[in-house]
Amino acid sequence: MGRRLVPLTLDNLSDLPQRCRSCVFWELDPVSGEAAVRAGTPQAEKEAWISAVLLDWGSCGRVVYVDDVPVGFVLYAPPAYVPRSLAFPTSPVAADAVQLMTAWVMPGYQGQGLGRVIVQTVAKDLLRRGFRAIEAFGDARWKEPACVLPVDHLLAVGFKTVRPHPRHPRLRLELRTTLSWKEDVELALDRLLGAVHKEPVLRPL
């Protein structure tokens, strides 16, 4: 079984589930999000958000393929690019962290370790870019697939609660705890050889 995690771009956005392609829960603040839905433009808004973040900050997601079939994805970005995060009672996300916005794995491929592979891939990307942690808002009452990830899933892949809340706690994952010794050595070699270039300074949208 061959599996690949490919950076999300406008070219492979169509490989996300339809409901996720047209969802702007995280990408817009609550008022703007509702306005986009009423106007019938959420998919265009999603594309505009991804394009802007790619140009300004860089890679903000991965699409998971198993034997060339898209079976999942993950979205992440610094909180300055995620207006909805400010609406949560346990905000803000720490300044040294990137927010894990949402992730999804097709039901037939769940329970195969893809969730952990996704987190490790994001961690490796962000560590190379100078970040120390990933933070996420969890849903303690999760019942079905939604934009906010279940707390139990986040805990299972290594996150720890840093701000408790009965519904939406904020959780944190220190990046180095997700990487193996081998990956750390590879990263050190990359830096030694000058393969890692400093990312441009973050500018809010």
Image (tube, rainbow, N blue to C red):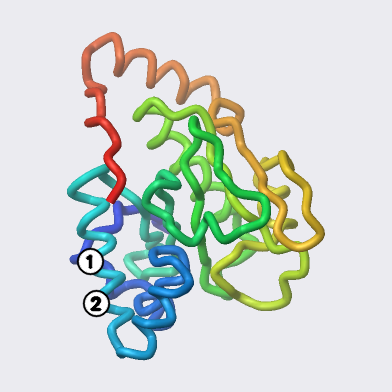
| Residue 168 x, y percent position in the rendering | 70, 59
Q: Quadrant of residue 139?
A: bottom right
Secondary element type, mark 2: helix
Pointer 2 local density, CA inside 10 Å: few below 14, some 14–19, many at least 20: few
Q: Tell whether label 1 touches label 2 (CB within 8 Å).
A: yes
Q: Quadrant of residue 35?
A: bottom left
Pointer 1 local density, CA inside 10 Å: few below 14, some 14–19, many at least 20: some
Q: Please indicate whether residue 18 sits to the left or right of residue 44 in the image.
A: right
Residue drawn at (44%, 74%), measured in percent from left and top?
A: 31
Residue drawn at (27%, 60%), measured in percent from left and top?
A: 50
| Residue 167 x, y percent position in the rendering | 76, 63
Q: Which residue is mark 2?
A: 44
Q: Which residue is mark 1?
A: 48
| Residue 96 x, y percent position in the rendering | 49, 30
The residue positioned farthest toward the right in the image shown: 166
| Residue 144 x, y percent position in the rendering | 67, 78
Residue drawn at (40%, 72%), measured in percent from left and top?
A: 24
From this view, report whether residue 164 is shown above or below residue 65.
above
Secondary element type, mark 1: helix
Residue drawn at (52%, 66%), measured in percent from left and top?
A: 104
Q: Distance of mark 2 from mark 1, alpha carbons?
A: 6 Å
Q: Considering the image in quadrants, where does the N terminus appear? A: bottom left
Q: Nearer the viewer, residue 175 or 121?
A: 175
Q: Amino acid at mark 2?
A: Ala
Q: Amino acid at mark 1?
A: Ala
